[in-house]
Image (cartoon, grey):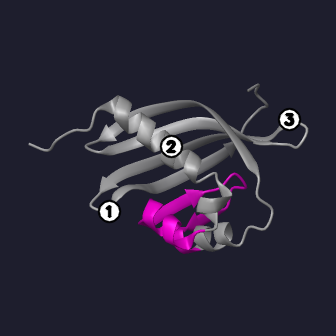
Amino acid sequence: MPRRTPVDSVQETLQALECELHQPKARADAGRLAELLHADFREFGRSGRAYNRAEIMASLTAETKPVTVHAQDFKLTELGLDVYLLSYRSAHLTPDGGLVHHTNRSSIWRLTAAGWQMVFHQGTPTAEFGA
């Protein structure tokens, strides 16, 4: 019988990996992105545009103006054996401490032989919320 990972541990791990992807260091590192994004990765961006793995990796590694991301209200839902949906809200933090680009986000993570990998991500614009 396959061994299940405790859900609390999974949420802690996936939340940390998700937040790592918000950081300029990870976004600029094609090797780290390749580790975290599954070969079949797809994204429906906040803009409504769809991306595949190569497109999102090229976009992230080409960023020249890093943003600070605020994320909150993480929720984990088990979809199957070692497959989870992580949902949360995010916004970009402005230099004066305000929040802009409020977004509902969801990611599907799968535990593979290479470790946890994101197979899908979606960002949907939402009404403003407080931190």
At x 38%, y 42%, the residue is 84
State the CA–CA distance, disc 1 to disc 3: 38 Å
**Residue 114 - label:** 1
Is there CB contact under 8 Å for labels 3 and 2?
no
Counting from the top left corner in percent of width and height, residue 86 is at 48, 39
Q: Is residue 49 above or below residue 80?
A: below
Q: Residues within 10 Å of mark 2 (few under 14, many from 20)?
A: few
Element at label 3 = loop
Q: Amino acid at mark 2?
A: Ala
Tell me, yes or no, whether the highlighted magenta stretch contains residue 30. yes
Q: Residues within 10 Å of mark 1 (few under 14, many from 20)?
A: few
Q: Amino acid at mark 1?
A: Ala
**Residue 34 - label:** none
Q: Amino acid at mark 3?
A: Gly
At x 60%, y 42%, the residue is 105
11 sits left or right of 33 in the view:
left
**Residue 97 - label:** 3
* Magenta segment: 29-54
For marks 2 and 1, the one nearer the N-term is 2
At x 59%, y 66%, the residue is 51
114 sits left or right of 3 in the view:
right
Element at label 2 = helix
For marks 1 and 3, the one nearer the N-term is 3
State the CA–CA distance, disc 2 to disc 1: 17 Å
Tell me, yes or no, whether the highlighted magenta stretch contains residue 65. no
Residue lying at the far right in this picture: please name it. 96
Nearer to the camera, 71 or 78: 71
For marks 3 and 2, the one nearer the N-term is 2
Residue identified by numbered label 2: 16
Q: Residues within 10 Å of mark 3 (few under 14, many from 20)?
A: few
